[in-house]
Image: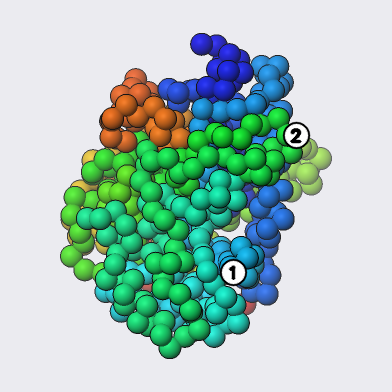
Amino acid sequence: MEAKEIIESGKAILGIEFGSTRIKGVITDDKGSVLAVGGFGWENSLLDGIWTYSEEEIWNGLQECYADVCKVVATEYGVKIKKFAAIGFSAMMHGYLAFNKDDELLVPFRTWRNTITAKAQEELTKEFNYNIPQRWSISHLYQAMLNKEEHVKDITFFTTLAGFVHWKLTGEKVLGVGDASGMFPIDIATGNYDEKMIAKFDELAKTTDLKLSLKDILPKVLTAGENAGYLTEEGAKLLDKSGELEAGIPLCPPEGDAGTGMVATNSVGVRTGNISAGTSVFAMVVLEKELSKVYPEIDLVTTPDGALVGMVHCNNCTSEINNWVKIFKEFYALMGQTPDMNELFTKLYSVAMEGDADCGDVMLYNYLSGEPVTGFEKGALVLARTAEAEFSLANLMRSNLYSAMATLKVGLDLMLKEEGVKVDEMYGHGGYFKTKGVGTKIAAAAINAPVSVMETASEGGAWGIAILADYMVNKNNESLSEFLNNTIFAGSKCEKCEPEAKDVEGFDKYIEKYKAGLAIERAAVDTL
């Protein structure tokens, strides 16, 4: 069928993902081919020391993103969208959205970016003997309980951003297992929340104002391929301001950006992994077995179909690179010129490859916000070098690109070197990998394993959640991995980069100085 006919007949799939700076919508056919892409830019706000997005911003962003997708379809195909074969929603994982019995949001949305739950993280990790990171939903809930916050007594439900959007459009308080695994630990044997840990949490809660058992306020866990409800009349109006979209469309389980990243890079099988690098950066490896001990730097989450995943998540990645690019844009303006920003990014990324493998002792810390993996609750931006350092544009940009991967490498080295976890190939996606032959080469050096970027990777998690929606209605008894291999990625092309010994050695040298220099970052945080 032609793209126009697929969309017009309601056989297309819609995926929408709420990223940290952009809400993106992708329409595909049942083979995963992209038919249209739209989006809407947004930014989080720091309100009373909390990183947040308002309810109004969430719904306005969703409507504007969908309207942009419809505008693209109308322009390219001359079609008004009335229905889809399936829809999926995804968003940044973790965070905290708590509601009362009247379904009212009790406090402003607390995003993954906040590092305000250190006490809760410490106590829960010790109690569960399981790493509970600060950004996890359960950490936010327990910290609110420890803080004796007024709203705790009224909580009847809490969820993630993806779960919130899905709930309001379908009426279903559910979550895909991957996103759920970033709220509370999952028992891999049952595919549901860990009952023993729930019992331990309920015991802790007896001395607090939380009225209900934890299992009564968590969303229901669903696995990839299950039906997660249907678009209601109210939901259709909330999504589509024009009123054209029909109710009754099936939705797949809402997922987090980690899960959609795994799908978008075909890395849901054992010994595969992926690196998602944009405003934040995280890497995941599908594990063959449990790790030997608890690592604060490593989260244990799941694939959308429930397999165990070792995950390293870092709050900072490309933001400081973007800030340096802005400086060069300002220089252009000073010289009376207006650069093509895509070309400027490409050239600055590419020149980094001419730098020294260890960045010529030019050291950069890109901590725009706190970085729990290295023990920072707050961040500061630091460029450090000795008088003897080889300070050049190439080394400056290479250090920028290294710094975006440095904290990730600290965590991954524990998995790959300390635990001996095997990974056959890693797949990259996100803006960091946009310039061909640059992000892949540096990431390969960081982990000393092949890194590939697929031709579809630029569409990211919005495409990944569309594929999960597609899988729900077209799985034909295949596992998720089989569906991806046989239907979505059959014959797909990718850019593969093998690690080069000099780059691996150079990055290892850089990271040793980076870790030793964290004292500089600490001084900057304490004094600036």
Quarter of image, res 368: bottom right
Which residue is outermost to the top? Answer: 1
Q: Horizontal and vertical percent for residue 181?
A: 37, 58
Callout 1 amino acid? Asn
515 or 105: which is nearer to us? Answer: 105
* Left or right: 221 in relation to 94: left
Residue 242: which numbered mark, if any?
A: 2
Residue 398 shows in this picture: no
The residue indicated by pointer 1 is 100
Residue 445: which numbered mark, if any?
A: none
Q: On the rendered image, what quadrant is the C terminus found in?
A: bottom right
Callout 2 amino acid? Ser
Q: Horizontal and vertical percent for residue 87?
A: 53, 36
- Residue 146 vertical placement versus 517 (above, below): below
118 or 382: which is nearer to us? Answer: 118
Q: Horizontal and vertical percent for residue 401?
A: 48, 50
Name which residue lies at 73% across and 34% down: 243
Of the numbered discs 2 and 1, the one sitting upstream in the chain is 1
Quarter of image, res 45: bottom right
